[in-house]
Image (cartoon, helix red, strand yellow):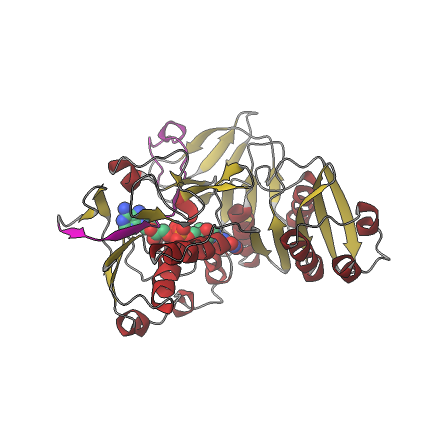
């Protein structure tokens, strides 16, 4: 392979390009990204960057000189509009067509928006935000002025992180969740309850089971109305209701797509010499197909693809992990808890952890301000071992003994 094209300019793109060089690939690497900025980290966008504690430069994954030094050609601020799978040719917004021997699609995901019909203006008016890109964060941050009212729609991690930042910045925050509880898609009831209480204790109004019927304001957003008749006056709205995998380009090439670009354990798509990695993919994992939205997955799957592009691939079989920072709380998650039928709660000093089981099988752990529980849980999952639930629940049992035992 002489010419590799990487389509997408995010976390996976940067990891893939770097790994190709690390593995000794000497051919041409071209990275095509729709955003103007070179690859950067998204997690701080809802944390330290939104709070104003991190400067912009700190977000970038590599110094500007890296790409030149490594001979990686960047085409930024330009979207790939069409992909010809047979010719491995990519047509850019400008009309230019670039051909490659191998292509990696690392197109990520885009935020969902509420339907236009919910907005009095017929579309989202000024003051309604999403938070996915640096440009989104740069539009939202200056609007977060102390004393203003913010409605956050969606009680997922991004909504909760933004709620924590907004309280620190002195805003009046209401968080609206359609499901009976927050974090319904990603965490157990115990974790959700803990975070609901935490945010309420910081002055956030958390409303669950709430259907939005109307978002008012013609020029600028003014209020949100709920199905029970409540109206919440607001200056700002942040919509954090999840993302859709960005599959548009893959579809132009006729690749197999089902809630993400379908890839095998090597990151290969349904077309020869076209791979995919990161948030945009659905991949086989322990007998089912999953899609992950995490930095870990973006990096590790991209690195697996880089190796496979060079003929040194091994199946990608991660133990998923994730984190979320909310004010002074660090949540660390190892494993995937979906399908659990039992949670063991462990209290330990300042922290606590929630251990997910299905029958006798240990699935995952949520560690709240408890890095040791996270580390032990992750190691057990990596070793395919199940801890004794009774020992876990006993705060007198040293967790490290569970790893050694
Ligand atoms: C606010 C926020 C906070 C987060 N916090 C955490 C966290 O705490 N921990 C964690 O593990 N994960 C977190 N995540 C998730 C994590 O950032 C993503 O999982 C990760 O960025 C995925 O990387 P990716 O490269 O697959 O996709 P992305 O980073 O989304 O990059 C994809 C890039 O491809 C570009 N693109 C798409 N289509 C085209 C095209 N046709 N042509 C050219 N370019 C294209 C997009 O514009 C984008 O720049 C967070 C995400 C957000 C938004």
Q: Residue at the spot x=86%, y=57% of the render?
A: 396
- From the top left corner, tell me how far across and down residue 91 is, in percent: 17, 47
Left or right: 129 with respect to 73?
right
Find the magenta span and give its range: 96-125
The answer to whether any part of residue 62 appears in the image is yes
- From the top left corner, tell me how far across and down residue 202 is, in percent: 65, 52
Left or right: 299 with respect to 396?
left
Q: Is residue 123 magenta?
A: yes
Q: Is residue 242 magenta?
A: no
Left or right: 163 with respect to 73?
right
Q: Residue furthest left?
A: 95
Q: Residue at the spot x=35%, y=39% of the render?
A: 125
On the rendered image, what quadrant is the N terminus found in? bottom left
Q: Look at the picture and state if 29 lies above or below 151.
A: below
Report the front residue among 112 and 65.
65
Report the front residue among 47 and 63.
63
Q: Residue at the spot x=17%, y=52% of the render?
A: 98
Which quarter of the picture shows residue 376? Answer: bottom right
- From the top left corner, tell me how far across and down residue 326 is, in percent: 59, 55
Left or right: 244 with respect to 365?
left
Q: Look at the picture and state if 264 lies above or below 379.
A: above
The answer to whether any part of residue 144 appears in the image is no
Which quarter of the picture shows residue 338? Answer: top right
């Amino acid at each position: 392979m002489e010419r590799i094209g990487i389509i997408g300019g995010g976390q996976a793109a940067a990891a893939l390009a770097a790994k190709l060089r690390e593995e000794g690939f000497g051919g041409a690497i071209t990275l095509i990204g729709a955003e103007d900025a070179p690859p950067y980290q998204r997690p701080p966008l809802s944390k330290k960057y939104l709070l104003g504690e991190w400067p912009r430069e700190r977000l970038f994954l590599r110094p500007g000189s890296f790409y030149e030094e490594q001979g990686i050609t960047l085409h930024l601020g330009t979207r790939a509009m069409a992909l010809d799978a047979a010719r491995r040719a990519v047509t850019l917004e400008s009309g230019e067509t670039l051909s490659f021997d191998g292509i990696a699609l690392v197109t990520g995901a885009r935020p969902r928006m509420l339907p236009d019909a919910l907005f009095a203006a017929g579309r989202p008016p000024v003051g309604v935000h999403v938070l996915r890109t640096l440009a989104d964060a740069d539009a939202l941050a200056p609007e977060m002025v102390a004393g203003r009212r913010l409605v956050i729609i969606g009680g997922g991690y991004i909504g909760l992180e933004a709620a924590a930042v907004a309280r620190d910045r002195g805003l009046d925050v209401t968080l609206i969740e359609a499901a009976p509880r927050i974090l319904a898609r990603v965490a157990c009831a115990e974790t959700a309850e803990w975070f609901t209480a935490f945010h309420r204790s910081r002055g956030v109004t958390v409303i669950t089971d709430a259907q939005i019927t109307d978002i008012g304001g013609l020029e600028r957003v003014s209020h949100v109305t709920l199905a029970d008749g409540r109206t919440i006056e607001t200056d700002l709205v942040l919509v954090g209701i999840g993302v859709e995998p960005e599959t548009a380009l893959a579809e132009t090439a006729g690749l197999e797509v089902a809630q993400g670009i379908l890839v095998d354990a090597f990151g290969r798509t349904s077309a020869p010499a076209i791979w995919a990695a990161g948030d945009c993919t659905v991949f086989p994992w322990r007998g089912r197909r999953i899609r992950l939205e995490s930095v870990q997955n973006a990096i590790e799957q991209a690195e697996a693809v880089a190796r496979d592009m060079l003929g040194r691939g091994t199946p990608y079989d991660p133990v998923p992990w994730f984190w979320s920072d909310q004010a002074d709380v660090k949540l660390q998650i190892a494993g995937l808890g979906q399908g659990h039928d039992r949670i063991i709660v462990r209290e330990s000093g300042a922290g606590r952890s929630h251990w997910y089981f299905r029958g006798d099988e240990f699935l995952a752990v949520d560690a709240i301000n408890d890095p040791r529980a996270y580390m032990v849980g992750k190691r057990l999952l990596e070793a395919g071992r199940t801890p004794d639930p009774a020992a876990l629940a006993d705060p007198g049992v040293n967790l490290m003994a569970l790893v050694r035992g």
